[in-house]
Each structure stands twice: as structure tokens, then as C-alpha cells.
Amino acid sequence: MFERIKSILIKEFLQVFRDPRMKVVMFVSPLVQLIVFGYAANTDVQNVPTAIYDLDNTFQSRQLIRAFTYSHYFTAKYFIATDREQNRLINKGRVSAVLRFDRGFGRDLEGNRSAEFQLILDASDSNTASIVLSYANQVLQQFNGGMLQERMTVFMETVPAIAGVDMRDRAWFNENLESKNYYIPGVMALIVTVMTLLLTSMSIVREKEIGTIEQLIVSPLRPIELILGKLAPFAVIGLAEMLLVTTIGVLWFSIPIRGSLLLLLGTTAIYLLTSLGVGLFISTLSSTQQEAMMSTFLFFFPANLLSGFMYPIQNMPVPVQYLTYLNPLRYYLVILRGIFLKGVGVQVLWADIVALLIFGIIILGLSSLRFRRSLG
Amino acid sequence: MSQDTTVAVEVHDLEKCFGSFVAVNRVNFQIARGEIFGFLGPNGAGKSTTIRMLCGILTPTSGSGKVAGFDIVREQRQIRQNIGYMSQKFSLYDDLTVEENIDFYSGLYRIPNSERAARKEEIIKTAGIEEFRTRLTKDISGGWKQRLALGCAIIHRPTIIFLDEPTSGVDPITRGNSWATIKEMAAHGVTVFVTTHYMDEAENCNRLALIYKGTRIAIGTPMEMKTVIMKDQVMEIQVPDSEIWSERVRAVSGVKQTALFGTAIHAVVESAEKTGPAIEALFKGAGVAGYTVRKILPSLEDVFVSLIEEYDHEHIKAA
Ligand SMILES: Nc1ncnc2c1ncn2[C@@H]1O[C@H](COP(=O)(O)OP(=O)(O)OP(=O)(O)O)[C@@H](O)[C@H]1O
Ligand SMILES: [Mg+2]
């Protein structure tokens, strides 16, 4: 039994490492994905390109503009003087915000009347727009507070301490609200998933394509031995891949790893039951590598969307939220974020780990049965 | 009959349908131990499908069969210990070297460690690929690949071996080499089931079956095929300007078919005794000198072409 598994195992390793495409899949594509999600898919809002439309041009208006541009949220890109320019810049996406002061702003403020100005936002990306708006409010609050203090100093000799409620928000586990900390553990999960899915399904389907599978069927090799011999190398490669992306994530992208590395590998191994099982299942559905690739992505997209990788699960409609409980990737993501960002251990994650284990056993078990039958 | 230890393979009314298409239509045959059994037929006749059922890759739709005394549906595991199989498609791993392929099969069949090196050398030597040992299999030519595949298929010394077109598309030297290996195995008591398109190779078989459109239309030794099974007779005609005469010979009553073999005309006739004199009369009447007309043993090709035509003829009439 072990003899035969060993020969399959050796063969798989030889083939994987001899295939130049596999090297790209294993080393280059994870790096590219990490870079894309670490840098490009950045939802942190900073340096919003802003146009300044100051028709008032008074000390007061300039003071407020300074308050905006001194914060690193807004960057003055254009100084404009007409509506036409304003519309052109917004329409062309040159700026996402326009600060507009009509004539009279300074005079009103001076005359102790409430003064108005406009903040025009490009809200085609509503997420970003609402973040920008909250930043603007923050800037304005500070400005008003400063004004109040100034006025009081003018009217009174001594300034009494002004008591007020001041909310100090502190984001736990991701102090700087950096989106990369949220994304990268997810990207790691996706990389490991796609890798093992493709490796497994393609390697089996390729044997169907070139006809070597018949040679295996007529040999004394048992289906279970074939499955073990095929899956064990890909499990090892999956774990190695996890270590690789963790190293890149920690060293390059400064993702914190607060929990146990051993737990990370252990839970990844449990998750691999699922991804290898699905790969095996796909191999029974496909007779060409192209079909296998298609099926892999057909499985992968919904799994990805319903995992909480891109869109937080609590934002989904309630029925869809229930649906996510059927998605093993969901549990794996919770576990990964728990380990990387929160540093929690089995005491907290056990329910997700058990769920993942149950899914893994069921999926791999059913796929193995189906695979056995597909061998005829 | 099934208890007979001299029978290596037997099938009864073996049938395989793909949907409504009948690929193998209630085929019967028996193969004795140590026999070289040739399975012949044009493309799509159902040869590979039959082999696949015997090896346990496909399950028959109906009918039964035994290989090495084991049932082909219920006792596939036992069969697998006893058989070797070389599929029609090249079935080694292109991205492994010659030696790695052999090592893989050694492990798959659990060849004892003490024997592995010797068997590997034997395969490499028999196939004549000493200089390619560490080369990737995709980088060696078709003929060498085929010899290597044959070697790997028999690495575990099976008692029955199924070869699906082991010599298709390779040069005559490789074909000769493969047939030497096959005969050598048969001499050691191995039963060989082989499919082929080459009629000259079919002559090497102890017995032949002709399969056409899924139906076994003839079975017997090559000699039986040429004498008893073929109802028509063949006359060989040597005559100057044979191309011109071929047409005219066909017009003679009693001649079914003519074909040119080199400079000779082969005429298929119902009866050599009746039609022979008529052909000679044709030449005499035209004043041709130096012709010979004689009855010959048909080639296997003649036999198969005539049997297939006969089959088609009957089935067109029936339809
Ligand atoms: N899996 C399958 N599904 C449907 N039809 C099939 C299948 N396998 C074979 N056939 C059909 O069955 C018929 C017999 O095929 P088979 O491969 O046995 O022929 P063959 O005698 O080996 O021909 P060749 O000399 O071309 O190898 C063909 O018409 C083929 O198209
Ligand atoms: Mg065939």
C-alpha cells in the first residue's frame, strides 16, 4: 500500500517542480496578488484631490482652506474661478472634492452671522464619499472649536475650561484602519485555495487527457491509494505556500502576526481537506484541463463573494448571511484574521475550527466516493 | 469450460452500448493460455472498447467474461494482479525521464527492491534505449516511446497482456522489435491479446478474430481464414499490360472483383474451376501470349475485404 502511494507521491512532486508554469503559479502569482491587494486595493482615504473655488478670497476663507489642506486628507490640486472649470474637473474625475466659497463668507463670519460654504463631492464611489465627508466634518469641527476659543479670548479676560463630550474612537486590532491588514490574510486564503484547487483538479484531469489514468486503473493501485498519493503532495505544497505568503505578508507588508504560527498551519491543514476535496470533485466533473479550470472558477467566485473577503458579511442581506455559513472559506477567513490581527487562539476560534473540520471531512469524503465511482 | 485452466480469456455475448450506439455487439471468443490472439478490424470497429472491458476500465452493458479465471465485472482486483495493458494512446508520463517512468511502474506493481535494478536494465536493453535513460520521455522519438511503454506494461511479468495497437505509427524496425518481444513472451507461456491494423503482423498470430461494426464476423487461425472461412477464391493472373486487362477480366462472368498486386491481377471468383477457363479463353481469343492463370491462397487482406463486403451486402439487403 505505502509502496504504491509513495510512487504516486514521488511522481507528483517530480511533475510539479518540473513544470515551469507551476513555478509561476506557486511563486509569482501569489506575489502579484499580494502586491495588488496590499497596495492597489487600498480603501484608506488620503490626499483626496481637491479643487479650491474661492470667490470670497478673504482672510476667513483662506483660513478655512488652510484647515482643510493642512490635514493630510485633502490636497489642493486646482485653484479655479468658474463653474465651468468646476464641472469639467469633477466630470473628468480630476478632483473628487471641490471647496467652494461664495462672496460674503468672510463678511458673514466677521459680522457674527453663520457663514456658508460648499463642499462638493464626487459620490460615484459612495463608500469613499462618505469617508471624505466624515473627514470634512472633523476638519470643520476643529475649525469651529478654534473660532469659539478665539472669540472667548476676545470677550473675556480669562478663558474658562469648556467641558464637552469628545469621542475618542480607537479601532481595535487594526489601529490605523489600514485596509491591507484586513485584505492580506484574506488574499492568503484565496491564494492557498486557488493553488490547491487547480493543482488537484488539473493533475488528475491531465491524466485523463493523456490517457495515463487508464494505466493506473488497470494496475493494482486502489482508488484510495491514488487519492492519497495525489493529495498528499498538494497538501504539503499548500502548507508551504501558506508559509511563503505569511512570510511575505509579515516582512514586506508588515502585517502583524499576533497569534500562533502553529495554529495557523494546523487550521490551514484542516482547511486543505476542503480545498483538496473540492479539487478532487472538480476532477470528476471535467474531462479536459480547460473544463477543470472553468469549474474551479465557477466554484471559486461565489465562495469568494460569500466569504467576507471583499464585502463584510454583516452588510449582506440576512438570507445571504445565512448562506455564508455553508461556505467553508468563511470560517477559514475568520480564523486567519483572528490569528493574524487579534492574536486569539483555540479558546475563541474553536467553533470555526470545528465547522471547518466537519465541512472538510464531508467534502473530501463525498468527493472520494465520487472519484472512486468515476474510475469505473 | 470456465474451469478449464488452459483458457486465459473468454467472453460470452459481451456487449457495450454508449447511449443508443452499440459499440460492441454480443461478441464471443476464447483464448487459450500462451496464445497470441489478434483482434482485427477497421477504425471504430470496437477493438479498444473490447479491451477496455476485459481490463476493467469499462463495465459491459451485458454479457459476461473471464480473464485469468476471474469475472471481468466482479473480480477486477484479482484480474489486475495478472494482466498488463498497453493502451492505444501513448501512456507514459512525458515529463518524466525514461528511468523515472520505469521506477514509477516498479513502485506501482511493487516489484521487490532486489529485482528492480535488473528489471529496469532489462527493459532499457530490450527497448534499445540505453543512451536515453535520463532523457525526458517527451524528447525521445515515437518508436522508442512505444518500446518503453511495452516494457513498462510487462514490468510485473503478467500472465496475460493486452496490447492495443502496439505498433501503430512506428517504423518497421520498431515493429519487428515489438513483435520479437511479443513472441518471446508467448514462448514463455504469456497470453497475448493484440489489436492491429497491419495484415502482415496478423500473420504472426496463432488465432485471429475479425470485428466489424461491433460484431465479430470471423474467427480462426490465419490459415482457416484463408481457406475455410473465405468462401470465394482468388486467382492470380500474370499478363503483359495488366492495368488494361484488369477491367476486362472483371467483366468475365463469375468474377466478383479484381485488384492489382504489383504487375499481377488478383481476381476474386466464386469458383476457380468454373471461372478459370473463362479467363483463359479471354486471353486466347485476344491472341495474348505468355499469360498464366492460377488459383492462389488469398492474403489476409483479401479475406477481410471480402468478409466485410459480404457483411455490408447482407446488412444492406436486410435493411
Ligand atoms: N466513451 C465513449 N462514448 C461514446 N462512444 C464511444 C466511446 N468510446 C468509443 N466510442 C465509440 O465506439 C466505437 C468503437 O470505438 P473503439 O475505440 O472501440 O474502436 P477501435 O476499433 O478501437 O477503433 P480504432 O482502430 O480507431 O482504435 C467508435 O465508434 C467510437 O466512436
Ligand atoms: Mg482503438
Image (cartoon, coloured by chain):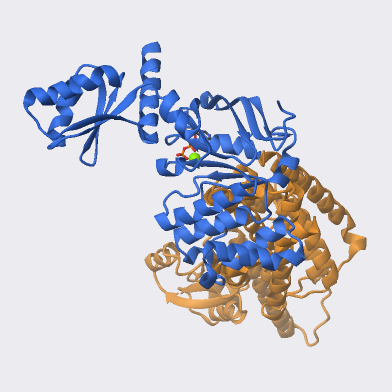
Residue B288 lies left or right of residue A112; in this view the side is: left
Choose top left, top right, bottom left or bottom right for residue A287: top right
Q: How many marks?
A: 0
Identify the hue of chain B: blue
Q: Residue at x 48, y 66 (%)?
A: B139
Image quarter where the N terminus of chain B lies is top right
Q: Position of residue A213 (x, y in %)?
A: 62, 49
Residue B222 lies left or right of residue A141; in this view the side is: left
Q: Position of residue A273 (x, y in %)?
A: 77, 54
Q: Residue at x 65, y 74 (%)?
A: A139
Identify the hue of chain A: orange
Choose top left, top right, bottom left or bottom right for residue A115: bottom right
Residue A309 lies left or right of residue B194; in this view the side is: right
Choose top left, top right, bottom left or bottom right for residue A320: top right
Q: Position of residue A222 (x, y in %)?
A: 75, 48
Q: Position of residue A304 (x, y in %)?
A: 66, 53
Which residue ends up furthest to the bottom in the rendered image?
A157
Q: Is residue A186 above or below residue A164?
A: above
Q: Residue at x 63, y 58 (%)?
A: A199
Question: Does residue A268 appear anywhere in the picture?
Answer: yes
Question: Does residue A274 appear anywhere in the picture?
Answer: no
Q: Nearer the viewer, residue A166 or A280?
A: A280
Q: Nearer the viewer, residue B106 or B304?
A: B304
Q: Nearer the viewer, residue B287 or B242?
A: B287
Q: Is residue A40 above or below residue A367?
A: below
